[in-house]
Amino acid sequence: MLARKLEHEKAQRMRVRGFTAAELPDMEALAYLDKSPMPDELTNVIHPAFQISHWVAQDSLPKHRGAVPLLGDHDGPWVAEDPAVGGHAPVSLALG
């Protein structure tokens, strides 16, 4: 019985890169299984290098190089002045 248990643990460790299934929840590696609500208030500060004021504006681009177009459901360029970009950028940068 003990040999079978050790063999099972060895197989788990090989499959999950050195860990067992019992160790994964302790490391919070299975966060997607947690049903408690996540906080929706981001409190971390965006690094000054990534603030929108440092982004290149479309007016400052050379005439032969335009802004990258947005693809999908939104029309317009990939610039901070576009509400589809600038409105979501602070949240995305705070997550990073």
Image (cartoon, helix red, strand yellow):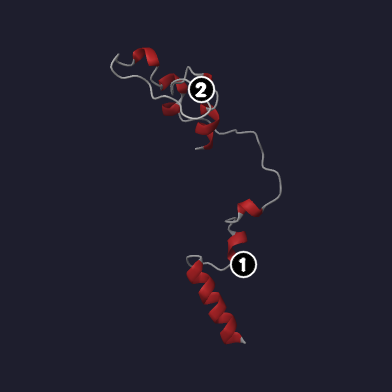
Position of 1 relative to 35 (above/below)? below
The secondary element bearing badge 2 is classed as: helix
The secondary element bearing badge 1 is classed as: loop
User: Residue 12 at what x, y percent from top left?
Assistant: 54, 71
- Tell me the mark number nearer the camera, choosing from 2 and 1: 2
Q: Residue at x 67, y 39 (%)?
A: 39
User: Residue 59 at what x, y percent from top left?
Assistant: 37, 12
C-alpha distance separating marks 2 and 1: 43 Å
| Quarter of the view holding residue 63 | top left
Q: Nearer the viewer, residue 71 or 66?
A: 71
| Residue assigned mark 2 | 86
Position of 7 relative to 54 (above/below)? below
| Residue assigned mark 1 | 22
User: Residue 19 at what x, y percent from top left?
Assistant: 53, 67
Please identify the residue farthest to the right as the structure is shown.
Answer: 36
Residue type at tag 1: Ala
Position of 95 relative to 51 (above/below)? below
Q: Mark 2 or mark 1: which comes first in sequence?
A: 1
User: Residue 94 at what x, y percent from top left?
Assistant: 53, 33
Badge 2 crowding class, 10 Å Cα cut-off, few under 14, some 14 to 19, many 20 or more, is: some
Q: Which mark is residue 50?
A: none
